Amino acid sequence: MIEVLQNYIDGQFVSCSNHIDSYNPATGEVHVKVPDSGQDEVDKAVKSAKEAFVKWSRTPAKERAKYLHKIADAIETRLEEFAVAESRDQGKPVWLARSVDIPRACLNFRFFATAILHQINMSTVLEEAAATNYTHQAPIGVAGLISPWNLPLYLLTFKIAPALAAGDTVVCKPSEMTSLTAHLLAGVMNDVGLPKGVCNMVYGVGPHAGEALVTHPDVPLISFTGGTVTGAHISAKAAPFCKRLSLELGGKNAGIVFEDVDLDKCIPTMIRSSFANQGEICLTTSRIYVHRSIYDDYVKRFVEAAKNLTVGDPSDSNNKMGALVSKEHLAKVTGYVEKAEKEGATICCGKEPLSLPDRNKNGYFMRPTVITNIKDDSPAMTEEIFGPVVCITPFDSEDEVICRANSLPYGLAACVWTESSGRTHRVSQQLDVGTVWVNCWMVRDLNVPFGGAKKSGIGREGLHDSLNFYTEVKTICIKH
Ligand code: NAD
């Protein structure tokens, strides 16, 4: 029997009349039926969240923090169940969900639970005006949270945790492809006794459920993570309402490898940054510029390492990579490789979908793919592929590579590899991106801002940025 998911509205699991199929990427079979919600379901969820806001926004921070810790505890207790659900939803290896995604989701709750206990308001005395100024940070209302499929629990909880910590209530619209994971989270919210209406979960597709949320007049905040085209569309839809918007969008991240690096350290990290989670991470490195003097050696060693990555059933912990999220996405990713080959590029390894036996015979698998001899204006070099495909190209000078790295409309992240401290600062400061990693990748601390430049996003997430996004800062001036 295929499980039929229910929305979580006003502290109740409620059925929906229409459903869509959600496929397990590793088997190609329908594994759950997801509510195809629309205006009606969103209206009910927003109404409940609006009513719950009255009490939740006045609940002392200490009490809100206790709920967030309880949620983290409950996720930890059910860690294996969450890891398997994420893998069934998205195709990622269970070991990866177990070791990265789910622990990070717990951290999201614990981090913001403790952060709100340490906020102090400073006041300023204006002597000439004989007045005292101070700021008061107040929750805003119902936050609409829309998340993508690639890091299902990690990204959804990176929105829910700061919103609830700040005193807002939420209506979540997770990706229609990874609703099982969100459904388990709704179960946790219910089990820990979170007051009804504080966190609602409405499933469905973007144009129905998502858009109903974005255009709902009682939802003053929208936090969206997803593709750039969707983000621009949401931005236009939200504009007439003057909503507060946070947009975390797509990327086409460059890696820049200078001639002074230790390739024994660089290559394993760049392999991870290119192929972890099947390359389905917004921060994935998808174009690597290597100094011409080490280019041949780099390509040889990188291709060897890529060929050694095992791809297969996500439940087998020997496999480094699982399945791509959907049949359509697999076709899109392989399409970029075919196009590049037709243009004359060299496909060093990978390329085609990978056929596996038995339960995986209809799964959406692909080997790590490395492309060289590719022109800078090829779609594989300019567009977000969001799969296990990386292009490698040589460069001759620092100025040239900065210019080529900055030439695209995206600006999410970049990796720079060098032993020179002068070059580290020079190059990092000139790259038009939100995050530069030097001699590393994906090292994240929630205290620091995270987000994209140019078409990769608007706004930042992280300790202060997230708490500021979900609150209104008022200045109060009192005449003595
Ligand atoms: P997507 O834009 O297709 O969908 C994201 C979410 O938006 C889903 O929940 C979807 O249902 C919803 N949606 C779609 N159309 C909508 C509409 N008209 N109105 C309201 N909601 C709508 O993205 P995706 O394919 O799920 O995710 C992949 C993309 O997300 C990639 O581009 C990736 O780079 C990006 N991403 C960015 C970050 C970041 O932090 N910058 C993190 C992860 C993923």
Image: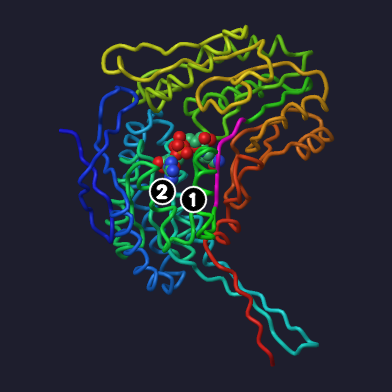
Residue at the far front in the pictured view: 240
Residue 382 vertical position relative to residue 183 in the rendered view, above or below: above
* Secondary structure at numbered mark 1: helix
> Does the numbered disc 1 mark a residue whose Cβ is under 8 Å from ligand 1?
yes
Residue 142 vertical position relative to residue 323 in the rendered view, above or below: below
Q: Is residue 148 left or right of residue 80?
A: right
Dot 2 corresponds to which residue? 211
Is residue 101 visible in this depiction of the protein? no
Based on the picture, tell me whether residue 30 belongs to the magenta stretch. no
Q: Is residue 25 left or right of residue 420?
A: left
Q: Residue at x 68, y 38 (%)?
A: 436
Q: Quadrant of the C terminus?
A: bottom right
Based on the picture, tell me whether residue 251 belongs to the magenta stretch. yes
The answer to which quarter of the image holds residue 341 is top right
> Does the numbered disc 2 mark a residue whose Cβ is under 8 Å from ligand 1?
yes
Q: Give the residue type at disc 1.
A: Lys
What segment is highlighted magenta in the picture? 246-252
Is residue 351 visible in this depiction of the protein? yes
Dot 1 corresponds to which residue? 237
